[in-house]
Amino acid sequence: MNEQQKAFVARFLGRGLLSKKKNKKITAAYEDYLGHEARFKTLATEIPKEVPAMQSLIRRLPAVLEHKNKGDFAAASLAMAELVKEAETLKVQVKYEQDLAGIQGELDAAGLLATDGQPALETARQLLEQRRQAMQQRALAGDHAGASALVPGVGEAARAFVALEAKYQRYKLALTGIQGDLDAAEQIAPDGQVALVAAQKQARTKREAMQKLATEGDFDGALGAVQGAGEAALALVALEAKYRPYKLALAGIQGDIDAARLIVPDGQAALTQAKQSFDQKRLAMLQLAQTGDYDGALGAVTGVGTAAKSAVTLETQYKSYKSELAKIQAGIDEAMNLSTEDMLPLETAKATFQQKHDALAPLLLKGDYLGAQALLQGVKDSAKAASDLRAKYDHCITAVLVTGGPDFAYLQKLANDAPPSGAIKDALFGYKDMMRKLYQGDYAGCEKDFKTLQGQIAAVKLALTESDKTAKPKALLAAKKVEDLAGGKKLSTLSDQEKAALVLELKKLPLKDQTDILADLHGSSEPVDAEGRLIQIALYQAMKLDENFEKEDAKKRKAYSEELAADTEIQDTVEDWNAVKDGKPVVSVAQQQAVLEKILKAQSKVYNIPVPVIRWYDGDAGDFGGFNTTSGIISLNNRYLSDPQEMINTVLHENTHNYQDQLVKRFFNGEIPESDPLYLQAKTFAVSHHMDAYVKGSEDGPAYKGQPEEMHAWGAGDTEAPKLLAALRQAKQDRETT
């Protein structure tokens, strides 16, 4: 007790107002009162006086003091205890209210916030509401202590909600800055583009990751993800913006692309190359697009379109060419399979067709289908010309060899066995002219001549019967003359030494006598027998050319040799005949052939004979060429073109046979008088100018080269070819040194 209380108690005790026992009871009540009073005073300091409930309690103090002043400490203690209890309750309530006031700003701030549909904010607000309702329910139930205990949790939830919403606002503000890009990105259709699909996937992944962070309430993380999401969306939008002009440009050439992709090259190198070029450019463009380089892809569109259009145009031209080709293919196949029968006109016609057909190949190779199509008419015409010529040939052969077979066989045998003299001259020359027309392609003329000859056969046979009456005895007499020189022996019985002696005897005979024996020996329409053949061989081994003829022939040889030696073109070509420059021949095959044709023309001009047609062929070794007296055609083997001397030799040799053929014709036609220096030799050529009188080298080598025609031809070739080559080279050298 304080001093005042002690004094108050002493006053009561000092007066002796109470008995000792009673005083003790009063003292205890007073002490209880004093305890309650002290607690009330403490509570009064703890509870703000402006609290109405506290003021109400204070107003009740006088009534309590009245009990105390009366000494009714029990009543005063009881009343004061009631005040203390209410003050204690009020203190808790006031504390709750104070605590609540401490967070009221946060609650107010939280109350002003909207969750904006954000799950995290909704959750935070729900937590706040749950805690606040729990606090309020306790307060309403009077459990202010319990309510006050919940205030920190409510404040924490309010602060968390406000803080979270603040983070959300920062995130929302940043999100607003990229929302346009996000919306634009969301509207983009990738159109199957790998790059756009990838960019869209990345944009969605980043946006969804950002939204997931926001949904989870990690607005700081979401804010950090905004830039990445915006950049990805912006990249997608920018990429799609580049794709649009590429797509538009691509649409402009899509028709050509589709058409080009359907192209079937059909084995055509040019089409294959064009399609490959298109495919390469298209794939390169698509590769750029696939990697998202739409600027590069756009730049490649023109090249792809050009390549596609070029390939489509080329295929269109090829189809047109192929269509036109199909119309004439049957004619081409017929011409391709055409057999020429070694007939120069047919060979020439087929070669012309082949040349025109072969001209297609290089054009097709480089894709010039328009040029190739332009040549098809020439191919068609040449194929038809070759086939038509073959048909005429077949018709002629049928008429002559099949229908008129026996008559033709008779004429052929007659031409082989006897010279065209006397009664059969016209018929045999007619046969020769007919055969020449056959070989040279005048098939209608050949048929016409054959019909004429058929009409003459009966007269020819009659004439031969009459002429043989004298010719056969002459043949026997001619044989006897030779056998007499052999001591009256048959040549078939002679030893080699005796044969050699006979040749020496025959050499003593003048050429005229030798020729007369040969003429009589072959005067009959029948071929010579074995004895006659031996006599003929012995004569050929003994014969020489007529001196007068040789002099004239030497002049002619000199004339054409000098003319040719002065030809600068021939000089240059011969000089470079086999030269090679940069891996290629300096002189082409065509140039080599042209020189040989020029030599042929020069020799023919000097001899005043028709220039024979040359038939070039690819023959076997040892086969240099030949002159066909029936066709009038010279054949030359391409195999020996690399040997200029051999080829010149062959040309001069074979054209000399052509000259002999013309002399024989003139002789039998009476165009060479006996006074002519050529007469005797022409007669010699004439009587031996048929197959029965010809000796092949395989039969007897000396006789082969000794027979007049071969002796003359070999002399022309072997003598003049090396001399001409030497003269050409000397002239070339002289020209270069002057």
Image: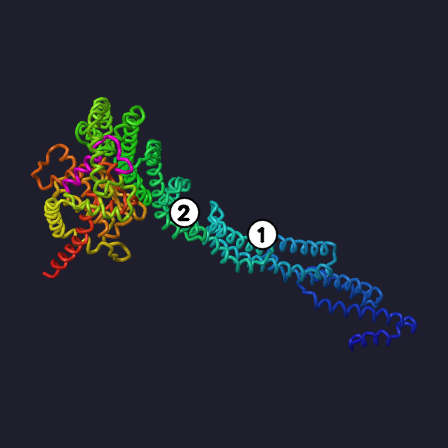
In terms of depth relative to the viewer, which is nearer, 362 or 609? Answer: 609
Cα–Cα span, label 1 and label 2: 54 Å
Q: Residue at x 17, y 51 (%)?
A: 720
User: Residue visible at 15% across and 38% down?
Assistant: 683
Between disc 1 and disc 2, whose residue precedes? 1
Q: Which mark is residue 118?
A: 1
531 left or right of 121 in image:
left
- How dense is the environment of label 1, judged by Cα within 10 Å: few (below 14), some, or many (20 and up)? some
How busy is the neighbourhood of tag 2: few (under 14 within 10 Å), some, or many (20 plus)?
some
Amino acid type of disc 2?
Asp
Whether 101 is drawn above or below 614: the answer is below
Q: Does the segment drawn in magenta span residue 30?
A: no
The quarter in which the N terminus is drawn is bottom right
Q: Name the amino acid, label 1.
A: Gln
Question: Is residue 364 among the parts visible in the rendering?
Answer: yes
Residue in front for this viewpoint, 657 or 359? 657
Residue at the left extreme, as displayed: 675
User: Please, is residue 275 above or below residue 320 in the view?
Assistant: below
Q: Which mark is residue 279?
A: 2
Q: Position of residue 95 (x, y in %)?
A: 69, 63
Residue 168 in picture, x, y percent from top left: 55, 56
Question: Over which residues does the magenta segment extend?
Answer: 511-532
Say if the magenta span includes residue 531: yes
**Which of the 4 image quarters holds residue 722?**
bottom left
In the picture provided, is 41 more to the left or to the right than 176?
Answer: right
The relative height of residue 143 versus residue 697 in the rendered view (above or below) is below
Q: Is residue 738 left or right of residue 124?
A: left
Q: Position of residue 374 (x, y in %)?
A: 27, 37
Give above or below for 186 relative to 730: above
Quarter occupied by the C terminus? bottom left
